[in-house]
Amino acid sequence: MGELRFHSAVFRAIAVVCFVVGASGYLFPERASELEALDTLVPNVERSVKDCPYTIYQHGGFALASSIFVDRYVDKTYSHTVRVQYGEVTCVGLIVDESHVLTTADCTSSEEGTLPEIKLTNETLPLISAIEQFPHPEYNVTLLRLNESITVTHLAVPACFWDSSFDDGFEKIQLIDLASNGSLKREETKCTFQNRKECLMALLKTGGVLQTRAIANYRMHPFVFTFGSDDEGLALPVLNYIPWMEEVLGYKILPSECTSKYSDFRDYEDSMASRSDNFVQVQYSKSRLSSTNIEQYKVRIVPKTAETGSKRHCYGSLIAPKFVLTAANCLRQYEVDGYTIEMGQYNVYYPVQENSIRVRTEAKKIHYHPEFDAATLANDVALLEIVKPLYTFNKTVLPACIWPWDKLPVDEYQTNGYVPFNESDDESVRTNQFFATANVYDECLDKVPQHQFCAGFPTALSPKSCHNSVGSAMSRSLYALGRYFDYIFAINSKGENCGFNLPTVYTKIAPYVQWIDSIVHATKVHYEDDTKYYGDRCQNDNGAEGTCVSLRYCPKLDQEAKQGKPVSPSSSCSFGKQNEMVVCCTAENVLRDEEHREQLSQAIEEIDSCKHLYHEFRKNKSPYDVDNFPTYPYMAFIQGSGERSCNGTLVAKQFVLTTASCYQSIAQDNVTVVLGNSTLQTIAIQRTFMHPEYSNVSTEFNLILLKLATVATVNNETIPACLWHNQTHTPLRLEEVYIEGKEKVKHHQNGFPLYNEACLRMDPVSNVTGLQLCVQHDRKYYQRSLFFQEDASNVLVSHFAQGVNEYQVTYLVGMYGSGRIARQTDGDEEDRNTFYHIYQRISEYYGWIKNIITVEAQHAVVN
């Protein structure tokens, strides 16, 4: 027994810890096929709400714990009832509190000194005598005062009383009555939405106790709604005589107090618990109703009106820094000059516990859907425009993503509600919020307009415990791009009791995505540089595509010019900072002559077909986010005669790319390039090709190509990187690669691209242009975050799997070079800065790099 008691004590301790840490009904993220197929390429410019996962990628979740524990099972079916014995007569009784029992007049007497006795569910306990009775003056119910108090346990706990109308009926109704042998019996009837009223009326013709089990505080509470009978023999609603009970007892009978006071003695919610023999397993994440905050995307909209009370509020969802999506019908109720937007509610436990609203801002302009119908609630969507946009996102303020597809992806969703309140200055009262777990129904009770549907859960809640947050969103966390994000699917248009017992009407958002985009993204100004820089794509006078290069790097046109034939500069190319003639060189003009066609073809293949080459030397790409055995076969170490050195990237067998500024800073006598890891290749430099637009003060065009004296040997340790040439999209998963310390050890840190617009907004002095890329360190991987303070030609790469064997192909996406960072102070942590490295986009220089390599390939090759 000693060992058994020891294990029991440990078991209870674990259960308490789990409860404190994880008492939440937050649904676990789900996977959706539409998001599984989401491209891992980020558009360089944000143009739609569909880009949301890329926009808030750094805030995506990647770990979520759940509280699961096991408790002993106790059958509490009759814990709130007693048997009232008066002579040979036995009646059903209800525990009202520790000192009172409610029963029918059949078990009471008008004779003095003859009062009934009470038998609790626990048969081992002795009878309790009544010492006073209080018969109702009109109905056949009586309150009994006991001569000793009932000790509240799992087997003896007061009933709760339904103090509201129940005309709509319930999903499940239990009848508790006496069996023929004098024991208690319970029969349960399940009613459908279509026959609830008929089902209820049939049961009202029976005797005994009628109750339903309602949800509150993660538990199932027995709510008695009829007990006793009227003159016609119909079941008597307890609502009719609750005032009389309150007068006798001397206190108010409130459902909220009953559920709060006795929660620890009730069964866990049916959805949370799974029973096995004498034990029950409990998981809080499966709760149908749990507390939450007005945080992340959730917004409370308070009209600037003199009206008081909780129902004057609307709710909504932040979907962009400047816009809140909500229900048009809620805003249309008020003719006001503006609204207060409340959000960012945050729990603080030390040094003083608080749960206050951290963000209050103002909104004035409303964009109603042009086809909104206030009478039918058709097209019940509106956008509320915030006066001062919220650009700083964190764990308490974060936009939601919109599900843009018509078909809903999962079965269960989270909806929102709040605890009803009268006007109060106490913020802790005004901010009590609920998350409810809802299912989508096949049909609504009443006809609804197109794009609307119903959702909820058929079990009842404790009366008046949850109001619908009209305008709030039906949401669910979904996995996308290796982490999860909150997606919203529909807007709460109308309903009561947070969708419990009877469903709530929702307006689907997907049909309105185009309208939302037309407002949210129409207000953005996109700065696009149409200048054709050196190396950019162009069209010649005949409409053929080519590359903007100087005449000497267009061999065929260069020869024609030397022969005296007329050659004109390209009108579509910028002359930039160099003084040579710039032409639009087409593919046929790159060929020097037929004798060099093979060399040209090989060079073009090395650039354009890079991903298909060298598979015999490539390793298989790691299936995990983190490669525990990284290799850097594309990295080059450039060493001069002094102590200064540069990093470089092997982009072809005879070419290394680095930054012009770093290369100029090293002593250039006897400069060599070292390739490989354990088996090193040390190669001299034959020629250098600095970008013609580079200047010593520029942070753009800061590149130089180094032509090696001999062709590098490709092996497991030395493989050229492919050049990223997509000018509209950037890989999502990036690695910032650098060489550290005297030992020249290669390392990397994971990062992801930011929209340049966001980078400029966070740090206006960063001056990021379309030729550059802003990269943020990804904190998911718990790597130390390094900030590159000087130009060492650190590189930005991304890995892709190629072919059925998923060989790892590395693309060079960016080169640091500028020595610049952008920084932002996080709004909720003033002492914490977020840094962003600024890289040169290789895609913007692809044409120049390819031109140099293909032209140089037609010169004599040194082996």
Image (tube, rainbow, N blue to C red):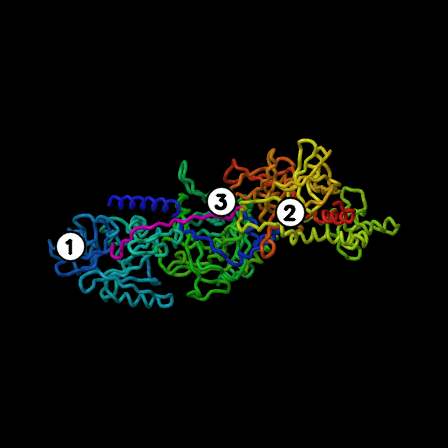
- Tell whether label 3 touches label 2 (CB within 8 Å): no
Helix, strand, or loop for circle 3? loop
Whichever of callouts 1 and 3 sits on the residue coming sooner in the sequence is: 1
| Amino acid type of the residue that numbered disc 3 sits on in the rendered structure | Lys
Q: Determine whether 261 is above or below 189 in the image.
A: above
Give the percent coordinates (x, y) of residue 694: 73, 40
At label 2, counting other C-alpha atoms closer than 10 Å, the crowd grade (few under 14, some 14-19, many 20 or more) is: some
For the residues labelled 1 and 2, the Cα–Cα distance comes to 94 Å
Residue 177 vertical position relative to residue 252 in the rendered view, above or below: below
In front: label 1 or label 2: 2
Question: Mark 3 packing: few (<14 Cα in 10 Å), some, or many (20+)?
Answer: few
- Is 59 in the magenta? yes
Report which quarter residue 460 is drawn in.
bottom left
Looking at the image, tell me whether mark 1 or mark 2 is earlier in sequence order. 1
Q: Which residue is mark 3?
A: 395
Q: Is residue 155 magenta?
A: no
State which region is magenta: 58-79
Rendered location of residue 186, percent (x, y): 25, 62
Q: Residue at x 78, y 47 (%)?
A: 859
Q: Amino acid at mark 1?
A: Glu
